Amino acid sequence: MRVVSYNIQYSKGMDGRFDLQRTCAVIRGADLVCLQEVDQYWHRSGDVDQAAEISDLMPTYYYVYGASFDVDASSATVHGAVSNRRRRHGNMILSRWPILSSRSFNLPKRHYDDKFNMQMGFIEAVVATAHGAMRVYSYHAGYLESEERQAQVRRFAEVFERSPREHGAWCGKSDIDGVDWHNGQPTPAMPERAIVCGDFNANIETEEYRLLLAETGLVDCWALADPEQANVATWKSERGEDVRMWGKIDHILVTPDLAPAIAGVSIDHETEASDHKPIELRLALA
């Protein structure tokens, strides 16, 4: 199983060009893909629904999209007819297998008088893989301060820990007062097994990274498969800053039961399709 995590920077490459076809060429062939920074109806990225366009470019994949940033982008004619549209920015999960259920969550956000900050979040999906159902998360943390990211990690850990105990998108009896809410389908699973991907804006030496592992019990795939690359930079600043101090801020983490199946990890340092580098996990599952 190939798992890719990629902050696509709304398809803006290091050359300043927006190109979703180039983005999709980087991720095509993976079994599970977790994306961050997917736009819907922003002027900067062409006023298009990038989630829908990615789906069109990758027609053999199932997908779910969850926006944390969601504001009005509607318009009205002179006669008052409203064209409802939302300007969104968020996370996406693509899968070769059906996605049984999904949920989106917002993360804690602080206000800064002198800095731009926006609502961040993560999306949870339950995927019916060929090796059984598993949870998959695409996460994007705030970029400003460690204290905010620590609060975000605590929120994620709370959801992550309780999800299996809450069961799936629905649970219990199939009807309410005789009305079928199962739609003739079995209750979706909410398994313990999980893969967590994303742009955490925190390298392995930060307090928020250590808190993430401590609160969730997750295992960092690089720590096991390639510790020498565990803190290699995965972000390249368009401003030409020295990013070595940032280290590896994009991560793929797994529940301990998946650790023995880790067959390899890699970072694509060649592509210029985003300011982030796509990272990949390979799992050898029976």
Image: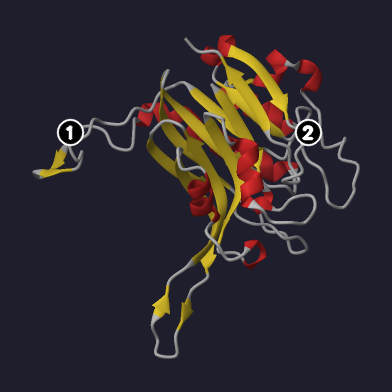
Residue in the picture at 87% in, 52% down: 239
Residue 250 picture quarter? top right
**Is 184 on the left or on the right of 253, as rendered?**
left
Depth order, front residue of 128/27: 27
Give the residue type at disc 2: His
Residue mark closest to the camera, 1 vs 2: 2
User: Which label's residue is closer to the chain start, 1 or 2?
Assistant: 1
Residue at 46%, 43% (x, y): give it.
59
Q: Report the number of numbered marks.
A: 2
Q: Residues within 10 Å of mark 1 (few under 14, many from 20)?
A: few
User: In this rendering, would 121 be left or right of 280?
Assistant: left
| Residue 41, horizontal then vertical, whole percent | 55, 64
Residue sitting farthest toward the left: 178
- State whether residue 256 is above or below residue 175: above
- Secondary structure, mark 1, is loop
Q: Residues within 10 Å of mark 2 (few under 14, many from 20)?
A: few
Q: Position of residue 82 (x, y in %)?
A: 41, 78
- Please say if 275 is above or below 75: above
Is 5 situated above or below 238?
above
Can you identify the residue that label 2 sits on?
Answer: 269
Residue, disc 1: 173
Image coords of residue 100 (percent x, y): 36, 34
Q: Secondary structure under badge 2?
A: loop
Q: Quadrant of residue 122?
A: top right
Q: Which of the 4 image quarters holds residue 81?
A: bottom left
